[in-house]
């Protein structure tokens, strides 16, 4: 579709209604809440309904939390239109995509920012967070837009992919940087010079200057989705000052397409395809991961383990120790009172691709599966229920 302007709330809403009506095979609307003035907040679910939903990754794209960020208005329709195209078939086969085209309808109608900057609004708690609770997104993109702000603090020409400051667990910083880098490259390839932003400079600005404290970038929704579900959360700033509405739509779409494409692949350190959000404690050498036969089981497992992650004592849990150059010992200690009913997956990585002679856990043989790359072997062990003060010692000989 072409956009001659940054369309109004009514235009977006009509467009979305029409879209769902003419794409019933792949799309449906869910009302996820009401605005303070009584407008429906809509989520559009898009997927290939002929394939089992439990096998799919869940991607959540939140658009338009800030009503005066005009560029966000064209990104939702552009994304939905692409999702209905042939090019998106593979993504629809493998993923359940949830698009919230106007997260804050009242702010969009009135053309105002519309949210408190230092905390989650009640509106977000009762709509977006409830949605998160229901579907446990694997990945999240929160779409914003900048213009030439009167405060002169984003320089009028910015386009950015944003990663969060609170993602310190496992290898999340590396993973988020790597994925964001891919998105920045995709933006560049499409002709849009996106930057990679973290929230840290804004936090620092906020500390330094009182006057900026009302203007700091806020991403409380992403923070909450990461903290609750270990969703990989990204933000994006498209630009509605230097770009036409059409170009703004194209730039946003380029970045989101690149994010969605990553959910179709197997990441190097993962066994299963999909978003790399399963390392919940530890690192690329030894980790506690979500467990499950399909994407939905792994999501529920991820949520359960993540909620108890502090009972795996950091930073060295699992603890990986080379006994000699042909054997390695992995110790996992769980100190929680509540058991992890559905179990965990333990992963560790061995240098090279030697033949594995034996793997024991607490002196007994255990089943495992492996994945090899050019330089190493990843070993995966699925463990059943983890109990209070559980200690597992795994020794691998190779
Ligand atoms: Zn914003």
Image (tube, helix red, strand yellow):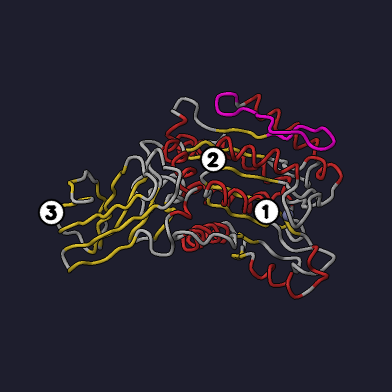
Asked if residue 247 lies left or right of residue 82, the reply is: right
What residue is at 81 percent from the left and 52 percent from the top? 113
Observer-nearest residue: 202 or 347? 347
Q: Please identify the residue farthest to the bottom as the structure is shown.
A: 208
What residue is at 32 percent from the left and 40 percent from the top? 384
- Residue 83, quarter of picture: top right
Q: Quadrant of the C terminus?
A: bottom left
Q: Is mark 2 within 8 Å of ligand 1?
A: no
Asked whether 282 falls inside the magenta stretch, the response is: no
User: Marks 1 and 3, Cα distance to the nearest angstrom?
Assistant: 49 Å
What residue is at 51 percent from the left and 45 percent from the top? 138
Asked whether 29 falls inside the magenta stretch, the response is: yes
Question: Which type of secondary structure does the marked residue at label 2 adopt?
Answer: loop
Q: Which residue is mark 3?
A: 357
Q: Are marks 1 and 3 in contact (CB under 8 Å)?
A: no
Horizontal and vertical percent position of residue 382:
31, 43
Q: Quadrant of the N terminus?
A: top right
User: Marks 2 and 1, Cα distance to the nearest angstrom?
Assistant: 17 Å
Q: Which residue is mark 1?
A: 220
Asked if residue 312 lies left or right of residue 106, the reply is: left
Span of residues in magenta: 24-42
Report crowding for label 3: few under 14, some 14 to 19, many 20 or more residues within 10 A (C-alpha). Answer: few
Question: Which type of secondary structure does the marked residue at label 1 adopt?
Answer: helix
* Image vertical order of residue 73 relative to residue 211, above or below: above
Q: Which residue is mark 2?
A: 136
User: Marks 2 and 3, Cα distance to the nearest angstrom?
Assistant: 39 Å
Residue 268 visible in the current orientation: no
Quadrant containing ligand 1: bottom right
- First in sequence: mark 2 vs mark 3: 2
């Amino acid at each position: 579709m072409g956009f001659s302007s940054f369309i109004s709330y009514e235009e977006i809403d009509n467009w979305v209604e029409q879209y769902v009506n003419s794409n019933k095979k792949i799309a449906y609307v869910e009302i996820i809440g009401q605005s303070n003035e009584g407008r429906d907040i809509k989520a559009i679910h898009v997927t290939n309904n002929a394939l089992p939903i439990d096998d799919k990754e869940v991607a959540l794209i939140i658009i338009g939390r800030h009503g005066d960020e005009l560029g966000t208005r064209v990104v939702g329709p552009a994304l939905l239109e692409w999702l209905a195209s042939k090019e998106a078939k593979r993504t629809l086969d493998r993923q359940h995509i949830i698009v919230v085209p106007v997260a804050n309808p009242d702010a969009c109608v009135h053309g105002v920012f519309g949210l408190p900057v230092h905390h989650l609004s009640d509106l977000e708690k009762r709509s977006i967070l409830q949605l998160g609770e229901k579907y446990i997104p694997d990945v999240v993109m929160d779409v914003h837009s900048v213009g030439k702000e009167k405060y002169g603090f984003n320089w009028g020409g910015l386009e950015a992919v944003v990663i969060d400051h609170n993602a310190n667990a496992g290898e999340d910083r590396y993973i988020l940087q790597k994925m964001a880098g891919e998105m920045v490259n995709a933006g560049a390839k499409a002709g849009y010079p996106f930057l990679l932003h973290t929230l840290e400079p804004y936090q620092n600005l906020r500390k330094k200057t009182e006057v900026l404290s009302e203007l700091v970038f806020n991403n409380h929704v992403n923070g909450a989705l990461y903290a609750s579900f270990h969703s990989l959360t990204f933000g994006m700033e498209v630009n509605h000052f230097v770009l036409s509405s059409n170009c703004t739509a194209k730039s946003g779409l380029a970045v989101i397409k690149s994010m969605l494409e990553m959910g179709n692949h197997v990441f190097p350190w993962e066994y299963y395809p999909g978003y790399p959000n399963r390392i919940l404690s530890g690192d690329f050498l030894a980790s506690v991961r979500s467990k499950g036969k399909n994407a939905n089981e792994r999501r529920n497992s991820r949520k359960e383990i993540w909620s108890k992650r502090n009972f795996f004592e950091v930073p060295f849990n699992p603890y990986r120790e080379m006994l000699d150059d042909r054997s390695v010992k992995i110790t996992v200690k769980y100190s929680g009172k509540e058991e992890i009913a559905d179990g965990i997956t333990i992963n560790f990585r061995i240098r090279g691709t030697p033949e594995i002679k034996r793997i024991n856990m607490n002196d007994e043989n255990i089943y495992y599966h492996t994945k090899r790359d050019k330089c190493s072997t990843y070993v995966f062990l699925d463990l059943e229920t983890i109990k209070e003060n559980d200690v597992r010692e795994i020794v691998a000989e190779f």
